[in-house]
Image (cartoon, rainbow, N blue to C red):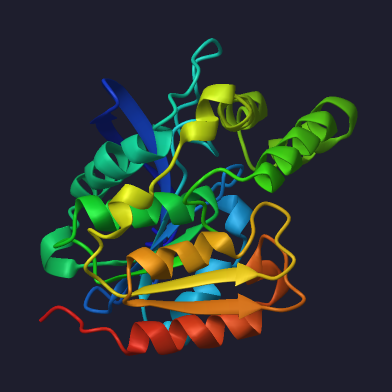
Amino acid sequence: MNPDAIACADIHALGRDLRLEYQWIAAARPDAPLLVFLHEGLGSVSMWKDWPRQLCEACGCRGLVYSRPGYGRSTPRPAQEKWPVEFMHDQAREVLPALLRALDVDARRDRPVLYGHSDGGSIALLYAAMHPDAVAGVVAAAPHIFVEDVSVASIAQARRAYLETDLPARLGRHHAHADSAFWGWNDIWLDPAFRAWNLEPYLSRIACPVLAIQGLGDEYGTLAQIRGIRRLAPQTELLEIPDCGHSPHKDQPARVTQAVAGFVGGLEQPR
C-alpha cells in the first residue's frame, strides 16, 4: 500500500460526523518536521497539484494535505446550509484539531508548521492564536485578516464566472460536489454580514514566527492584509512579491520555495 495515497479520516466536529480527504507527503520520514497545508477558498487536496511534495522536498519535511468539509472528496456541505460568518474560526477551533487527533498527530509534541493559502492562511493564523503551544510556525500566503472592497469585487466576479462560464466543470475536476464548494464560499463572502468579519483581535495572541506572503498584483486583497499581521504580531516576516497575483505558489514558485525553506529551517524544532 502506498503510504502517500489519498485516504479519508472520520472525525466529529461542527456538531456532526464528517469524513475528510487527506494525503500524507513523505510519510516514510516520521521524524521529519511536519508541514500541514490549508487550501484556499475553492481548493482541495488535488487543487494543490504537486506543490506540497515539491515544498516538502525543499524543506526536508513530511507533509499533510487535506480538504476541508464541503471540498474535494470530503463530506459535502448540505445544499441548504449557509456557512456562518465565523466559519474560518470554526475550522481552526474544531476541524483541524479533530483531524490531527484522528491521524494520531500530537500537535503539542510535534508542533507542525502550517502553510495556508488565502482562506487557508486565515485559518492557519487563527489556529496559531487559539492553540499557541501546538504550532511551530505559520506561512500565510495571500491571507485575509479583514474584508476589503477588492476582495468582495473579485468574489462577485467569480460568481458571474460560475454562472456564465465552464468554471463548474473545471472545479468538478477537484471537487465531488462543485456546487457545495463554490456556493458555500461565495455566498458567505458576499453576505453583507460578512463585511464585519475580522481576525485582527486574534493576531496578538500568536506566539510563533510567521512568514506572511503576498503578491503585489493580488486581485483579492491589498498589502494592508500582511502588513496588518506584522503590526499586530511583530515576529512576522513579510515577503511582498512583484509579478505575482493571489496564488504565490503558482505565480512565483521558486521565490516562495526559497523563502519558506529558509523560514522552516530557522524554526526551533521539537525534541
Any part of residue 25 in sight:
no
28 to the left or right of 48: left
256 to the left or right of 61: right
Q: Quadrant of residue 167?
A: top right
In the displayed structure, 146 sits above or below 53; it is above
The residue shown at (36%, 57%) is 125
Q: Position of residue 253 (x, y in %)?
A: 64, 77
In the displayed structure, 201 sits above or below 107; it is above
Residue at the limit of the structure toward the right, as seen here: 164
The residue shown at (47%, 80%) is 260
Any part of residue 12 in sight:
yes
In the displayed structure, 181 sits above or below 41; it is above
Residue at the limit of the structure toward the top, as seen here: 80
Q: Quadrant of residue 217?
A: bottom right
- Assign the N terminus to one quadrant of the image: bottom left
Q: Quadrant of residue 94?
A: top left
Q: Position of residue 255 (x, y in %)?
A: 62, 84
Closer to us: 38 or 178: 38
61 to the left or right of 50: left
The residue shown at (34%, 89%) is 265
- Assign the C terminus to one quadrant of the image: bottom left
Q: Position of residue 187 (x, y in %)?
A: 61, 24
The residue shown at (64%, 43%) is 174
Q: Position of residue 207 (x, y in %)?
A: 21, 68
Residue at the limit of the structure toward the front, as seen here: 231
Closer to us: 40 or 218: 218
In the displayed structure, 80 sits above or below 28; it is above
The count of marks equals 0
245 to the left or right of 97: right
